[in-house]
Image (spheres, rainbow, N blue to C red):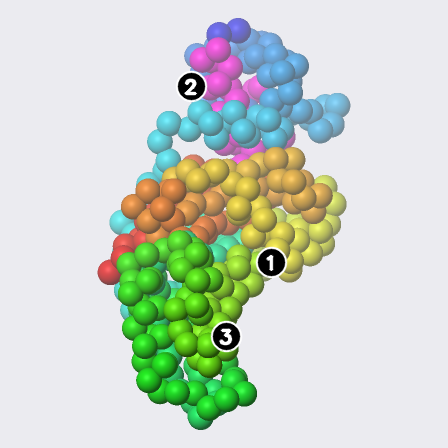
């Protein structure tokens, strides 16, 4: 069996199984695909694919279905990610261009991605640690209360309130605001840690409690476990995929409810234009029959991204179409945040 034909047979099996949800037989492949060989030859090819663990026979008299390993080879061999139609591109532009702030952008993005892919969409909020500071404001709320406002280049706004035992000196507040903006302007927030830790020593002893409190709040905001969060949409799409799971979809729903699980999966994915985790590649028992397609957004290169977005669904997924939708939405979202 030639290597090229084996890949063609595998591709045809994946495409037919994704389209029909039915195990694929050799006669069906011959009828639907111009493979140029007889059913007997196809059967031999399928036997070899099965021997290599790329397809499996769910029942004695049935056709074959792709395995996780087969899906992985199929995804790795995809030469061109399916582009979106002109109508889909216009839908992205119209929906996201009307967003009024970051929260609105994220909400619109996650709904759009769920609609485009018919899967569960997941969008991670831009990480403070990987964002660049645009401005930091200190707003007195009362003689002993101070509001710390962090504004990033992605439009994310984080607010923290500080209460002090002594009355807050407006002059110290103004000086502290100026120094913080000099330290952080145009820099990624995670690069400010050393300066924030040293900042209290630059003020008189009687003012250090306030400066220390502000520095601690900023450092706390930069801790990844404290500021990471995600938004979901399209969970109802799982109900339409119930037959794709040998067990109930309960474990998948439970995993979706645990934000820490999804954040961990996102963090473990490669920083590629589009990354795919298939079935057993997800290190979580509840997602052993699910696939995740994700991309970073918010940077000129994947390594510069501020967060991830993606979709989760059964391994029987339209990978070219899903990868195209995820890539397109990530790119458009990056342009919006850059603007």
Please report the residue visible at 62 percent of the width from the left and 23 percent of the height from the top: 55
Return the residue found at the far bottom: 143
Secondary structure beneath dot 2 equals loop
Instruction: Answer yes or no: is residue 44 visible.
Output: yes
Instruction: Answer yes or no: is residue 115 visible.
Output: no
Queried whether the magenta region covers residue 18, the answer comes back as: yes
Question: Cα distance, mark 1 to mark 2?
Answer: 45 Å
Category of crowding for the residue at label 1, using alpha-carbon neighbours closer than 10 angstroms: few (below 14), some (14–19), many (at least 20): some
Please report the residue visible at 38 percent of the width from the left and 42 percent of the height from the top: 303
Question: Cα distance, mark 1 to mark 3?
Answer: 29 Å
Queried whether the magenta region covers residue 253, the answer comes back as: no
Secondary structure beneath dot 3 equals helix
Q: How many marks?
A: 3
Q: Which residue is mark 2?
A: 34
Find out whether the residues at labels 1 and 2 contact each other: C-beta distance under 8 Å. Answer: no
Q: Which residue is mark 1?
A: 259
Could you tell which of marks 3 and 2 lies nearer the N-terminus?
A: 2
Q: Which residue is mark 3?
A: 213
């Amino acid at each position: 069996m030639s290597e090229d034909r084996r890949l063609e047979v595998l591709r045809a099996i994946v495409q037919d199984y994704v389209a029909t949800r039915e195990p694929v037989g050799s006669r069906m492949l011959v009828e639907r695909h111009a493979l140029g060989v007889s059913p007997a030859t196809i059967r031999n090819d399928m036997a070899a694919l099965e021997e290599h663990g790329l397809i499996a026979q769910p029942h004695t008299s049935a056709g074959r279905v792709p395995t996780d390993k087969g899906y992985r080879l199929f995804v790795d061999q995809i030469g061109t990610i399916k582009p979106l139609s002109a109508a889909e591109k216009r839908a992205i532009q119209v929906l996201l261009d009307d967003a009024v702030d970051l929260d609105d952008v994220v909400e619109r993005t996650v709904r759009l991605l769920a609609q485009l892919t018919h899967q569960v969409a997941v969008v991670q909020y831009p990480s403070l640690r990987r964002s660049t500071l645009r401005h930091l404001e200190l707003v007195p709320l009362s003689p002993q209360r101070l509001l710390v406002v962090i504004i990033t280049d992605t439009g994310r706004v984080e607010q923290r309130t500080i209460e002090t035992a002594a009355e807050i000196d407006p002059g110290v507040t103004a000086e502290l605001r100026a120094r913080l903006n000099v330290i952080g302007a145009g820099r990624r927030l995670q690069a400010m840690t050393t300066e924030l830790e040293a900042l209290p020593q630059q003020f008189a002893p009687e003012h250090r409690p306030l400066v220390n409190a502000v520095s601690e709040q900023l450092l706390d905001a930069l801790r990844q476990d404290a500021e990471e969060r995600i938004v979901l949409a399209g969970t109802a799409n799982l109900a339409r995929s119930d037959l794709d799971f040998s067990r109930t979809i309960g474990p998948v729903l439970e995993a979706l409810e645990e934000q820490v699980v999804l954040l961990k999966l996102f963090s473990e994915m490669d920083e590629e234009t589009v990354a795919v985790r298939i079935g057993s590649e997800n290190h979580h028992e509840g997602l052993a029959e699910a696939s995740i397609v994700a991309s970073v957004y918010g940077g000129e290169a994947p390594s510069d991204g501020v967060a991830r977005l993606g979709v989760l669904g059964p391994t029987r997924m339209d990978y070219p179409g899903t990868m195209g939708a995820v890539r397109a939405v990530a790119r458009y979202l990056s342009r919006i945040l850059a603007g």
